[in-house]
């Protein structure tokens, strides 16, 4: 019953409204000369310094869904869920080198999206279109998942209803507010809100990881309780350590997820909004503070085991909603007002990434579909306007996904999203280093990687839940004819095949002397820093109709 | 567009810095956290944490240390921009 949770609901609502007000005020914050420009609305004027970037990118990469789903995974499967920690360690050294180059070349040429870069680098509008569509398709379910995070909190507070619309009314209202201030303030809104969100999360988690072990008999007994639970369960893959069969999956999932994360349009948007290369590099040393936080949050899953938390029932009869374990843990162990603060942290935590993701998807549509195919001579003001409207459409789509479809559908889609965004790696990440690949071969590699990735995901079932397809990302190597029980992350296999096809295709196309297309960038562009002027439009290659 | 002389110098210098051998150090925090043989064990425990957990959390420090070192060693000496 929601009446039992009145204090929590009040604290949650007050903080939520406070943050919404900040979102609207953000349009005035660091006020630009001219908001009617995509650089201003979509990239915050490319002017963010170290602190803002830290909060913005941190708030962007570590989403509410992460904070809810990772402990849920640990609660359910144990050690395998801890992959989030190596994943978020490995990403920063990768970004340190690669995204600095992307920042520089984007700074020189005024690129807003990764597809802009591909368009210019390989002289191929079709390859750019593929990169843009991949980005949009991968981002949409990610936005929907942020709603799953809020949903878990609302459910725990007893805010539910009988009909689908009544049950989701709070989410619809929350997203309507979010859509309104994103429309008005652009990237400045999540940048400003991120300060509140992250401060709340840090306070909540630090209190939780000091107080809860004290209450539950110390860390040793928390791990022992988890160990006892997994020993007793019949599932073969769980435990507080990895077993011989899931180590390869653990490592490839961590590495593949790291590669995927920085290819996501919303990460790139956060990075491109920073002021110079120094800001990015310093942040790569400072952002791992969030990884420590994530590691501690993950362990809340074990605390929930030690505290005997029983997750709330899921959407289908007989199933449980693992995402409710963390909200329930706070409800059970803390005073109401503090649980309310924790819920607000999760709820607001959903808004920051959702706003950035919708901006990133909108920028992709505007730059690489609208401007490329619908209105070549769009002015910067028109671009900004189209982006603002698209960001609204994207959010309506995300809400519709959650209200009308089984949330499980969004979770499946997000799983697929990680695999498909990886297929842009050869064009975007390797493209920053080498122009060796042929544009036609990159397209062929993309098609091969996509096809194989989808087929592999389709093959994965889970006998425990009765799901036959898309039940996870751990692909049994026995399906390839190996005599082993080991599993591997789908994305890694798909991107390797993608690379092989792209390399072989390049050799073939070059031997056949197929036109390469112009490269609109110069080697120096990849090292340009703040203060280097924009390359003139004449330096960009003329639009070409065929790839 | 003709690039002014001081800028050409500036980019040439930054390119030299980008090619620094210090960058190779960044492979350490990419490779080490991905070797389960290091961390996939219960003992020794530290403050009650099995090795699996405390050692992986410790790799965060390895990552921070390495990126900070590489940043400092490759930083451009810049005037006031």
Image (cartoon, rainbow, N blue to C red):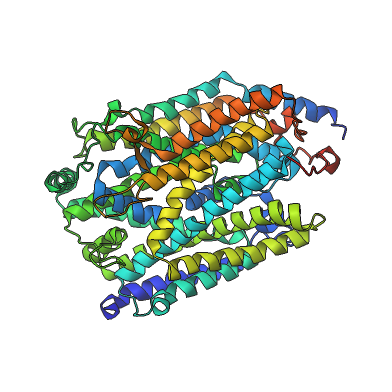
- Foreground pick, A542 / A147: A542
- Assign the C terminus of chain A to one quadrant of the image: top right
Is residue A290 in view from this perspective? Answer: yes
Which residue is at 50% across, 35% downward?
A: A495
Q: What is the number of callouts on the image?
A: 0
Residue closest to the far right: B2
The quadrant holding residue A244 is: top left
Which residue is at 69% across, 54% downward?
A: A369
- Foreground pick, A276 / A134: A134
- Left/right placement of residue A64 relative to residue B14 reads left
- Left/right placement of residue A510 relative to residue A25 reads right
Above or below, comparing residue A365 to residue A49 in the picture: below
Percent position of residue A247, x then y: 30, 33
- Foreground pick, A176 / A270: A176
- Left/right placement of residue A164 relative to residue B17 reads left
Is residue A26 in view from this perspective? Answer: no
Above or below, comparing residue A347 to residue A523 in the picture: below
Which residue is at 58% across, 34% downward?
A: A426
Which residue is at 31% across, 44% downward?
A: A81
Percent position of residue B24, x then y: 52, 22
- Left/right placement of residue A464 relative to residue A185 reads left
Percent position of residue A84, x then y: 37, 43
- Assign the N terminus of chain A to one quadrant of the image: bottom left
Percent position of residue A125, x then y: 72, 44
């Amino acid at each position: 019953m929601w009446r039992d949770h009145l204090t929590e609901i009040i604290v949650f609502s007050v903080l939520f409204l406070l943050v919404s007000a900040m979102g609207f005020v953000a349009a005035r914050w660091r006020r630009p000369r001219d908001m009617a420009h995509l650089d201003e609305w979509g990239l915050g004027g490319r002017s963010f310094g170290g602190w803002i970037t830290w909060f913005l990118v941190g708030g962007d990469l570590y989403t509410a869904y992460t904070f809810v789903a990772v402990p849920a995974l640990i609660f359910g499967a144990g050690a395998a869920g801890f992959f989030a920690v190596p994943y978020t360690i490995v990403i920063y050294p990768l970004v340190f080198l690669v995204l600095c180059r992307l920042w520089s070349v984007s700074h020189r040429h005024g690129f807003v999206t990764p597809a802009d870069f591909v368009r210019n680098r390989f002289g191929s509008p079709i390859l750019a279109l593929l990169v843009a569509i991949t980005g949009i398709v991968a981002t949409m379910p990610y936005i929907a998942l942020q709603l799953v995070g809020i949903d878990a909190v609302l459910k725990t507070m007893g805010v539910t209803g009988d009909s689908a619309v009544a049950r989701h009314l709070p989410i619809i209202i929350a997203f309507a507010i979010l859509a309104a201030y994103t429309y008005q303030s652009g990237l400045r809104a999540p940048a400003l809100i991120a300060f509140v969100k992250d401060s709340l999360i840090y306070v909540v988690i630090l209190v939780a990881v000091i107080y809860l072990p004290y209450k539950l008999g110390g860390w040793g007994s928390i791990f022992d309780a988890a160990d006892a639970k997994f020993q007793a369960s019949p599932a073969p893959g769980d435990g507080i350590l990895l077993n011989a069969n899931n180590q390869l999956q653990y490592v490839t999932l961590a590495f593949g997820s790291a590669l995927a994360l920085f290819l996501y349009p919303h990460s790139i948007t956060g990075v491109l909004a920073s002021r110079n290369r120094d800001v990015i590099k310093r942040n790569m040393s400072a952002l791992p503070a969030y990884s420590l936080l994530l590691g501690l949050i993950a362990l809340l899953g074990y605390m929930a085991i030690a505290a005997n938390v029983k997750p709330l029932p899921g959407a289908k009869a007989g199933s449980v909603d693992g995402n409710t374990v963390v909200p329930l843990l706070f409800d059970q162990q803390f005073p109401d007002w503090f649980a309310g603060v924790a819920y607000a942290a999760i709820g607001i935590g959903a808004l920051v990434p959702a706003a950035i993701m919708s901006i990133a998807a909108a920028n992709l549509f505007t730059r690489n579909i609208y401007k490329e195919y619908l209105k070549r001579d769009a002015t910067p003001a028109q671009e900004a306007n189209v982006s603002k409207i698209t960001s609204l459409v994207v959010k309506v789509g995300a809400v519709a996904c959650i209200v009308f479809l089984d949330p499980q559908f969004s979770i499946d889609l997000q799983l697929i999203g990680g695999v498909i965004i990886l297929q842009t790696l050869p064009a975007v990440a390797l493209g920053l280093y080498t122009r060796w690949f042929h544009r036609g071969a990159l397209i062929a590699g993309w098609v091969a990687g996509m096809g194989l990735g989808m087929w592999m995901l389709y093959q994965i079932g889970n006998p425990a839940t009765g799901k036959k397809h898309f039940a996870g990302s751990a692909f049994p190597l026995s399906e390839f004819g190996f005599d082993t029980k080991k599993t591997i992350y789908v994305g890694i296999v798909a991107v390797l095949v993608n690379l092989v096809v792209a390399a072989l295709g390049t050799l073939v196309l070059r031997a056949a002397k197929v036109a390469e297309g112009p490269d609109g960038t110069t080697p120096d562009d990849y090292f340009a820093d703040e203060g280097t002027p924009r390359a003139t439009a004449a330096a960009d290659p003329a639009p070409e109709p065929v790839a | 567009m003709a690039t002014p002389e001081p800028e050409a110098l500036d980019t040439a210098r930054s390119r030299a810095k980008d090619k620094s051998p210090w960058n190779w150090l960044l492979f350490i925090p990419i490779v080490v956290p991905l070797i389960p043989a290091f961390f996939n064990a219960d003992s020794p425990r530290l403050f009650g944490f099995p090795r699996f957990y405390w050692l992986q959390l410790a790799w965060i420090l390895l990552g921070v240390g390495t990126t900070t070192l590489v940043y400092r060693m490759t930083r451009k000496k810049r005037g006031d921009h």
